[in-house]
Image (spheres, rainbow, N blue to C red):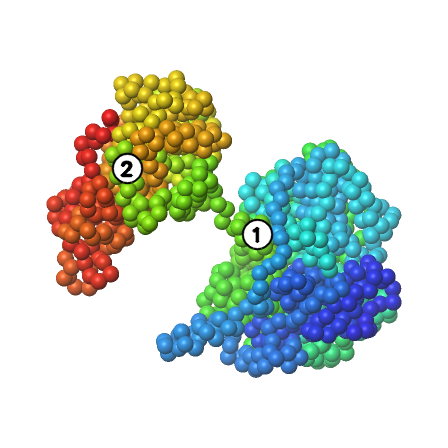
Amino acid sequence: MAQAYRLPKGGRIDRTKPVSFSFNGKPVQGYAGDTVASALLAGGIHLVARSFKYHRPRGIVSHGSDEPNALLDVDRGRGRADPNNRATVAEIFDGLTVGSQNHWPSLDFDVGEVNDLLSPVIVSGFYYKTFMWPRSFWTKVYEPRIRAAAGLGRAPEIPDPDRYQYRHAHCDVLVVGSGPAGLAAALAASESGKRVVLVDEQPELGGSLLNDVTSLIDGVTAQDWVRTALDTLDACTNVVILPRTTAVGYYNHNHIALAERVTDHLADPSSNLPRERLWQVRAKQVVLATGSHERPLVFADNDRPGIMMAESVRAYINRYGVAPGRQIVFATNGASAYTAAADARAAGLAVTMVDVRSEDECGPETGHLRSMGCEVLTGHTVVGSRGRKRVTGLIVAPVDSDGRVGSPRTLPCDCVGMSGGWTPAIHLFSQSRGKARYESSIDAFVPGTSVQAERSAGAAKGTYQLWECLSQGWAAGAEAAEHASERTFGATNSLVGFKPVRVLPTSTDPKRARAFIDFQNDVTAKDIRLAVREGFESIEHVKRYTTTGMATDQGKTSNMNALGLVAGILDRPVPAVGTTTFRLPYTPTTFGAFVGPSRHHLFDPVRTTPIHEWAVAQGAEFENVGLWKRAWYYPKPGEDRHAAVARECKAARTGVGIFDASTLGKIEVVGPDAAEFMNRIYTNAWLKLEPGKCRYGLMLKEDGYIMDDGVVARLAPDRFHVTTTTGGAPRVLAHMEDYLQTEWPDLKVFLTSITEQYAVIALQGPKAREVLEPLVSDIDLSPEAFPHMSVRTGSICGVPCRLFRVSFTGELGFEVNVPSDYGQSVWEALFEGGRTFGITPYGTETMHVLRAEKGFIIVGQETDGTVTPDDLGLSGLVAKTKPDFVGKRSLSRPDILSAGRKQLVGLMTDDPGEVLEEGAQIVTDPHQAIPMRMMGHVTSSYWSSNCGRSIALALLSGGRTRIGSRIYVTNPTGFTSAKVCEPVFFDPAGERINA
């Protein structure tokens, strides 16, 4: 397609490099440096989309990331396809394929446009009232149709072939935005020698200065000044410049997420490059120079293709060398549009200016434009537009100071540049939890009180005069870098200021006019009025009722018009209405960027122990426990799981079993206040625990419910070795760090995860000591010297070890902790030495059976987030004399002290061979009416070869008072009768553990 609207000269495109791509199957020509939007406009293509709800023809509105209409399916080849790409951001290259969305059968003829005829019926909120009856229609008619209509583009159907990457960085100063304020800030900060990162979402840095061909800065053109500034920054070794990089989120502690588009603009990207890179930057100071968004004017039929922002008209002319139209009408309520109009006239285009302000309210800008031969209609309003797939005329009329509208006339045109004022882009400031304030002089919210180490500058702060933006940016950069430096800039005066107008005056009945506020979601001014009339006065409620500001642009162009209109209807000041939440990400961001490398085999990383390969070689079956692969059982030829587990259980009780416990969480708590820290974080007492001793500890949440448990060893007065459950290790460490950093920062304690530093080998059974003795030196293993719940340091097989005398089976037991690198060799030595005693490796299933025989709990199995120590019969582990510990106050809550709480008990079925189902519900009367009263549930259930029968643990309402009674447990066909008993089934006296 010929570039009929390409200007003969000008722009920053490379005219020596023609580019061909396709739009809806038709070839389109452009040049290197074009976006899809600029190339389409150069070809005279304005109709690029259909609106979401009414399927109205829509065109390109802006030139940047705030584009609400021109969302396209983009196919970059080789399966690199995704929907909802903004045409104003997507860069063209040879072979690129793009297509419009949300229409059928074609963009030109869309059957869905029938919705536009139904618009009087399907107003905002109609679905809340319509899809309620008949009730049966919801699942059969309404929901399927709504789901089919939802969304714009189509999600890709093949796997994403691209790679995505994470990168972490630290800097002293992060500057977001490279317009005049951002460049000045980066220049000032760079002089300090500190690390500076400058990011901008555009391919070229320069921001609004890239559109400016008339302004001078310090005696040179704005674009020459940009070039010099970038050359200076490029030469600084302490500055990193990231184009095509959007700051998508501002988190706590100056943690900024940056999404860098690495290869989207390349026809044949290297396989070594990721498509996108997510930077996670910790910045000591941040300068937000994010600019501002131009507001549309709200008037009837303001959504026709060819109606766009005035500054975007300027951008397409000056930056891309494209005439969006040959006969352009500018409509405005402020001065800045005159700059765009003058540039359009200088490019040889016919220009007419319509200004809602009276002649007296305007400045010298009117005279300058008239001197260029343009008609300027001050004191005029826009009452409508003509055209269908492209605007052909703008209907205007005079308006007096009282808002009375005169006789209309139609101005022929093929493009309209509208400007309703400017809104500072305070999204990142708001995400940083800064408090915005309303500035009435510019009718906008601007950054107010900061919470984090950041500062805003330039248009993002409500400053629109060029020299002020430069000076403010320099001051912000110097302050952020703690660099005493001052600089004044000389620059051409900018045309600034506007008269706020929510909806342009019209002679048409406002109830009938289709004046759009949110283009993508088809929200009109009358929709906003309807929402307020129906009682929605909160701006957040209005947003949800009408969906204004909920599109992919997140209200960048619509929010101020919407909340200003709500304020006017309610007769309240704008600050009293407030703003909606500035949600992250700032612009739509791919799932791939957030997922990064966490795909395929990296999606759910597998952790293995140092002994894993040995277990594989022995034919072990494995189960997933958190991220860990754990040996489940070790079957011999011809054995199924039940036979293998029965054999392993017998071996551990009669001889010796060996178990890989390396996955247990391990945390070192070190420091002068380590004992005091332990005393506060656990329920039981730790101050008097002697070095060399172990203690079983319970950890509660603030609500008094059990969070984790484990054995803790005191290695020295200032050092504890804490064990946690396998799945709970990260949670426990985070819990500890949270309290240490936020509640008890005065404690001198250091926490270190040592889970992967130690392999843990459990030897359990009557023969455990005999297997261990020949391999251990420096440690007396006799019962008198090394009693149960003790810890010693020494060596095994010449390897340093921490040896625990603990047991999770109820047998004589030892846990050998050795550095991970020696884990398998020590295991093999123990296994070889134990052959004489019939040593048997066992897995997690056997471990579960053995501990259940002794009534030992597993957090997450015998607990469900609502279980207290007393519920498990562990109230003796709650210190009565400690002044405080986490969860102590909650233990005195009435609901925790109430009678009838579920308590841990044992269950024995009448039929010893029947194994209950875990999770099965318990009732006292199987013949009661439905719904039955459930009294509890089975938490653990196994066949015990050592007991010769099935055993089960359960949480039962008033359980300890029901010992000896009969209950009934659900099964797939009915109920199983069982007797309530103590939760210890083997060696109730505990004699074997002290052998």
Q: Which residue is mark 2?
A: 651
Q: Is residue 788 left or right of residue 361?
A: left
Q: Considering only vertical position in the picture, is 238 above or below 968?
A: above
Q: Is residue 669 left or right of residue 38?
A: left
Task: Indicate the position of residue 132 as horizontal and vertical percent values.
Answer: 39, 74
Q: Amino acid at mark 1?
A: Phe
Image position, residue 350 (x, y; %):
83, 72
Within 10 Å of the Cα at label 1, are there few (<14), some (14-19), or many (20+) other Cα atoms? some
**Residue under the image location 81 percent in, 60 percent down:** 13
Q: Which mark is residue 759?
A: none
23, 108: nearer the viewer: 23
Task: Give the residue drawn at x 76%, y 51%.
Answer: 206
Horizontally, residue 367 falls left or right of residue 515, namely right
Q: Earlier in the sequence, mark 2 or mark 1?
A: 1
Give the x, y percent position of residue 612: 45, 40
Residue on which the image places disc 1: 594
